[in-house]
Each structure stands twice: as C-alpha cells, then as structure tokens.
Image (cartoon, coloured by chain):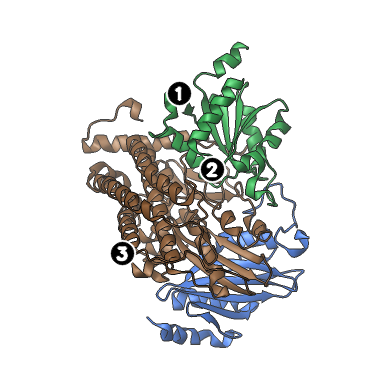
Chain colours: A blue, B green, C brown
Amino acid sequence: MNKKELDNKLSGIRDKLLGVEQTSEKRMYLPCEAENCYSVCKFLFEEVGCRFVIVTGIDAEDCFELLYHFSYDQLGCIVTVKTFIHDRDNPSIESIAQILPGAEWIEREIHDELGIEFKNHPNMRRLILADDWPEGVYPLRKDTKK
Amino acid sequence: MSWKTWSLKKSVWVFHVNTGACNNCDIEIVNLLTPKFDVERFGMKLVGSPRHADALLVTGVVTRQAAPRLKEVYRQTPKPCVVFAIGACACDKGIFHAGYHVVGPVDKIVREEDPNAIIAYVPGCPPKPEAMISGVVKALSAL
Amino acid sequence: MKETVRKPVLAVGPFHPLQEEMEFFQLTVDGEIVTDIDVRISYNHRGMEGIAETMQYDQIPFLVSRICGICSASHPLAYVQAVEDFAGITPPDRARYVRTIINELERIHSHVLWVGLAGHFIGYDTVFMWAWKYREPVLDLLEKITGNRNNYGNVRVGGCREDIPDELKPEILREMDKIEKKVDMLTKAVLDDPILHARLKGVGTLTKKDGIAYAVTGPTARGSGIKVDVRHDDPYAAYGELDWKVITQEQGDVFAKAVVRLLETSECIKMVREALKKLPGGPIAVEVKEIPPGEGCGHAEAPRGETFHYVRSDGGNRPVRHKMRAPSYVNVPSFRASCIGQHIADVTLTLAAVDPCYSCTERLAVVDSHNSVIHDYDSLLRLSREKTARLKKEIGAPEMRLEDI
C-alpha cells in the first residue's frame, strides 16, 4: 500500500472537499463543509478503511471547528477532516456515532464542553461534567473562559 | 488519651478513596501491600468498605463530581478516624489548581463535613511508599 | 421504560480509577446474564485540556505525564511529537533512543502490573504479589534515570530532559536478564495452566468487527486480531531502527489479551537491550527558540494503546488548543460489545482485561434509590473467584481452600 493508492481512494470524495492539505508526509488535512462532513467520515471509515481516532472541538472565535482525526494505519498517516460550524447560536452537525460507535463518547464530551448539538446521536446524555454542573455553561467556549 | 484513640493506633485498617488522581498515588498505595514494602506486617490492611476503616487514604484533587462522594465516604467512616491526604494534588491541588472542574483540596471538602476532622498530609508526586509509611507513623504518634 | 417488573441493576463504582475518569458502571442483569451496560464518567475529570491552555510549552510535558500515572512516558512523548511535527524540530539521535528506552521500561512494568492484577481478579493472589515484586526493580531503574519512580516527564520539545548515564547501562542489562526469566516463567505458567485456559478462554470476547467499529487500540485490539501498533505503523523515536515484531492473537477473549501482553513484555526486554547497545553519543536535546504558529498531531503507543495529542499554536508561548486522547477512552466503550451476554462473574475480569488503569483498589457501591440489587466490588470479586474454584474442581485440580476465596 503506498501513497498513490491512498490518493486514488480519496478521489471518490474529492468533490466534497474544499481542498487537500498535506503538511508533511504523514499528516493530511481535508477541509470540508459541515453538511458534507458525515459522508466524508463515512467514506473514510467504510471505503478507505481508516481507523477512527478522536474528534477535537475548537472554539475559534468566529466559528466552531471540528477536527475528525482518522489514522490510515497501512501508511501510518493521520488524516484529519476539518469542518467549520458558523452558526454560533445553534451549532449542530450530523452525528457519526451511528456508523462509528467508538465516536459516541467524544460527541457527548464535545456536547458538554462546547455545546454543539449532534443530530441523530443514539445516546446524548451528559458524560464528562458533574451532575450539578449548570446547564448552558460550556467550559471550553471562549466566552466562558473569559 | 481516650481508649478509642488508643485502640485506633494499633493495626490501622485503611480505605482508599480516589477523588480524581492520576492513578499514581493509588498504585503506590497498592505497592505498600506488596512484598517490597509489606505494610501488612504492621497490621495495616486495605479494606473494602469505609465502615470497616480506621483511616481514609484520599488521593487526587477533589473534582466537582467526586466531592459529594468523598463527604459520603467520610460520613460512613466510624469516628475517630484519620484522613490522610496522599500526594501533592490531595494536599493542595498541585498542578491541577487551575482546573474548572476541581473544587478541592481534600482538607477543605472534609472540613466542610466535619470541622474537627483529623487530617494528615503526605506530599509528593507521587509520594514514595517510604514517605507514606513515615507519614502514617508520624500522624499516629501525634494523636 | 414502561415495564412493570423492574430489572435488577448492578452498580459498580464510582470509585474505580481509570486513567482520566473514575467510572460508574450500571449492569442490567437477567439472572446471571448481563443484558446491558451503562457507564457514567466525570468523577476524575480534571479539565486538563483547559489547564493546558494556561501553561507554556515547556511546562505541558509535566502536566500531561500526570494524565495517567502508568502512561507517564507516552503522553508527554505524543505531545512533544505533536509540537515537533508543526515546528519542524528534529530531536537528536541519542534523544530518540533515550525516549525509546524509557517508553519500553514503562511498558514492561505496566504489563507486569497487569498480569498481577489479572491474577488477583481470578483468585491467584500469589501471582499478584510476585508480579508486583518483579516490577519494583524497573521502577528503581526509572528513578535512577529520571529522578522519579513514576511521572517521569522525561521528554521536552526538542529532546530529553535527563540522559541515561553510561555507568547505569550494566545495571539495566542485569535487571533485564532477571526480569526476562520471571516474565518467561509467568508466560509459561499462563500457557500451561489448564485452569486458566478454562477460566479465561471464550470470556469477554471482542470480535474483530466490533473492535474496528469501536476503534479500539493497543493490546485490546491486537488480542482481537487487529494489527494496530503505532510503533510499527508510524515509527517514531527509534522504533524503526530496532528489530521487533508486533504480537497479535485472533480470539479476542481475555486469554488472548493476556498472551499478547506477556509476549509483548518479552519483546520490550529485547528492545531495551538492543537500544542500549545501539545508543549513539551526542547531545540529548536541541535548543528550541520559538514555537511557530501551526497545528500538529502526535501519537505514541502507550502500554494500553495509542495516545493521541493535537496541538494548535498561534505563535505565542502557550497552545490555543491542546486535545489529548488516552487509549482507554476508546477501549472502555467496547465493554458494550464484550460484556453483554456474559455472566456477572466474568464482568470484573472482562473489564480488567482492557486494563483501564485498574489499580485494584476497593471501590464503593452506590445504588440509586430505584435499584433493587446491591453488588459492591467485593462481592463481584468473590463471584469471579468462586467461578475459578468451581472450574478447578471440575478439572480435578487440587481444591481451593476457603482462605483462598
């Protein structure tokens, strides 16, 4: 398995991506729109055979960024799907826990910490914050930190 | 010295409470029981319920979710009992002092429940098993 | 739920130290069989990702080494690799080898610790005491190298903090010889013992398909035939220059995971020896002036699986976002796949087989007001041990005495 085959496989979703950034030989970033994120992740997991690693949620002032990290183990390459949610008042995105049960916890965690809604999540309950943590306070949001 | 305190000082049975530790102090506590340190020769024993315990070994910063549980464990322990705050986090929150989910340290939470609680501190990250033995001996001889 | 008959729910926890979180398991049971499992974490949530944003790049290795006491070499390593990834820093050769040696020493003591705990759970307390005795010399070695028995924090961006002095080499080799004999003995004991075969085989099976869906890593994945090992797939430090092999087993049960860990320990010992032999001279760190803006990912193989760190910088002296993922974060949810349908007596063992940084400390049982059955840690442990005793009897092995249970 080499780099070329990975590139060939990725050509199936090229039209859904905003570009392909290759920062180094083993790190690849795939920016895409929020509505395409689910299908891109599904493609990476089911067609390309990537292993799901984790999702990083970032509050970048003007929008929320979600970074879905996958690992393509034959090459040791970390493929990161980068997506942006511009609606700060009602941030929401399609849940990938339906196809990837391993993503259930992290989506619940991001929901706790950043208040992003995951549509069609099988089990959206509080995971990481205490029972007496006030509703609507999201510790990793920039305005909460200030 | 009351007979209760006198009897507390022999063969201390301990209950271990993790309130948000990194697992290191906990492993060092279990290390105490294994052949190299072997505190069971002093009659010390890890017990499975706070109701059987003479002392609580509390490790870790107290997180928001763990604080009510720590109080509950302290309530269930027969008095008099000694609370040992094991490790830098338990003594003074250590490296996690800035955490939004941290409400510790241990003495603050235990004192909310009982202002006269006997609390002993064993600092270190993690404290060496020798330090824990020394801490327990010092605390018991100070009673 | 609209059922008129309430199902009994077993509560396990919450005082059960996982690496980042204590957990609270609720097992819904039907007779002896587990029909559902629910996990509540948060007890150990210290908000490290928030804390990391208030710390400088040089301070963070000390913070992340305290994510988990036993993985305190691999978390900082994954973090510095993430920073080195976008800052374009290459650590010197000697630093790469020192990192490898520290990481492998950590894996040895962690795997031996796990063998001890697994023995404890099935009622072999002698194994527990012996295994923990064998790992002590490794902790002493780490103390001699880094200054602390655990929480070494021995890496920094651009290299290592402490070097391995040449005069320590013979001692490390001597200890490796000693521990190799003990590990061989433990491996043979596990592979030959008919009781362990009967007790551990077919228990807590995680199929390959489930393993991939839950994205498990480390020995949990390798026990299910998924060949994932960051050291092999994306060789970091000096792993690409050493001769070793990835251990996998196909069955996915507790026995397979035990075999993976034991055989892996032998590989670790070999790697430490080889790395010491090849240890090049030169400095152990390069000078790092400024961390440029950018974002990077780093991962490393901890004893329990892949640790993953993502760091984003805006050019200041602190990261603007630092994401950390510990291996148990993906391994623990796989309990849903491996525990449902099992006997209650097997649950502690199945949970322990993933090695969620168990320190075998007693936990307290909390029961919600509407639950009807209380099972604390002790009674679950007793159930597990009774099953071992029963199997022993069936096989015809000498009967366990009452004190053993």
The residue closer to the viewer here, A125 or B42, is B42
In the rendered view, does C82 fall on the left or right side of B119? left
Both on one chain, marks 3 and 1? Answer: no
The residue closer to the viewer here, C384 or C166, is C166
Subunit bearing disc 2: B
Q: Residue A85: x percent and y percent?
A: 69, 74
For the residue labelled by badge 1, is the local secondary structure a helix, a strand or a loop? helix
User: In terms of image quadrants, where is residue C276?
Assistant: bottom left
Q: Residue C143: x percent and y percent?
A: 45, 47
What is the CA distance from the residue labelled 2 to the residue labelled 1? 22 Å
- Classify the position of the C terminus of chain C by image quarter: top left
| Residue plotted at (33% across, 26% down) | C402
For disc 1, the marked residue is B42
For disc 2, the marked residue is B126
| Residue plotted at (67% across, 64% down) | C318
Instruction: Select label 3 or label 2 by which is in front.
Output: 2
Q: Mark 2: which amino acid? A: Pro
The residue closer to the viewer here, B67 or C54, is C54
Q: Mark 3: which amino acid? A: Trp
